[in-house]
Amino acid sequence: MQQESLWLGRLRQPVKKAMIGFTGLTIILFVWLVANQLISADAIGMHEMIRPQGRPLVWLMLLSIAASLFFASLYLSDTKGEIEPQADGFFDIVSLVCSRLAMIAVALIVIVMFYEVVSRYVFSRPTLWANELSLWIAAFVFLLAGQYAMQQRSHIRIYVIYDIMPRWMQKTADVISVGLICGFFFALVWGGYNDAIRRMMRMETFGTAWDPPIPGTVKPAILVIILLVTIQAISNLIADWNKLPEHHKGIEDIDETEIENIRRTLEEK
């Protein structure tokens, strides 16, 4: 990752300090909760973490986690990866922030599954929540990945015909493509809005032992993130409107420089 500020500017250091502060608070609260499990019969566990009513410590933990993720996503979005294009659309920064949140979420899934493996096979104490929590997080990763793919123009596109079109016809095809995306969004909202609101208002749960509100959170999130994808598609259309046409290479014309940049990026990490 490059170290130059992409958009935060002078706010970069305050955001970094906020990220470190809230992350530290989250770790302290986590250690306290784990230690409390060993010394108290009324300790707060994962069952209570999704039922915070009347538990100020749970609310504090949840708010601390949310703040840590928020500021970490802001800070990490302030740098551009080696193979990322320059952010030039009016909505690109929002999508980059969401992409960093998805990146962190992938690491959280790994941590959760590692905890489950150790707990199950080392201590013979399998959890009731690890699998469902990983599914819950993965649902948001999947949705946010679509938004990032749209911002990066890395979704599946077939250029065989597009590349031989004159520029005015390419623009027409882009407008039709974005129009279809908008149509899909409106159809999805038309058909799913009432159901999503109903599930969210009653915070519908998963119906298991841990019983997390996966349907009550994921269903409305689908509509919200598809809206973000649609706005990003419009942002791409506006940003690319006056750009020169691109000619995409086939497999026989692989860009060795690009491959070398990817290899160097992976080695640095």
Image: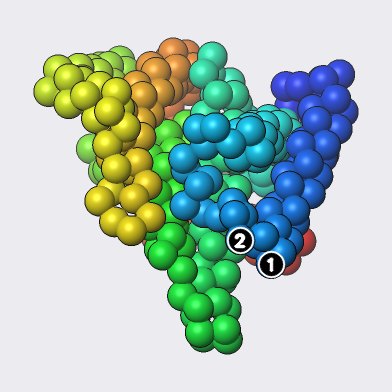
Q: Position of residue 110 (x, y in %)?
A: 55, 63
Q: Position of residue 175 (x, y in %)?
A: 27, 16
Q: Residues within 10 Å of mark 2 (few under 14, many from 20)?
A: few
Q: Position of residue 114 (x, y in %)?
A: 56, 71
Q: Which residue was labeled with disc 1?
A: 38
Residue 234, picture quadrant: top left
Q: Is residue 38 left or right of residue 108?
A: right
Residues marked 1 and 2 touching at CB (< 8 Å): no
Q: Secondary structure at mark 2?
A: loop
Tell me what residue is drawn at x 35 percent, y 35 percent.
217
* Residue type, label 2: Ala
Residue 188, picture quadrant: top left
Q: Which residue was labeled with disc 2?
A: 41
Tell me what residue is drawn at x 69 percent, y 67 percent.
38
The answer to whether any part of residue 253 appears in the image is: no
Q: Compared to 88, does 129 lie above or below?
A: below
Tell me what residue is drawn at x 41 percent, y 65 percent.
128
Residue situated in front as seen by the camera: 191 or 8: 191
**Quarter of the figure with the C terminus:** bottom right
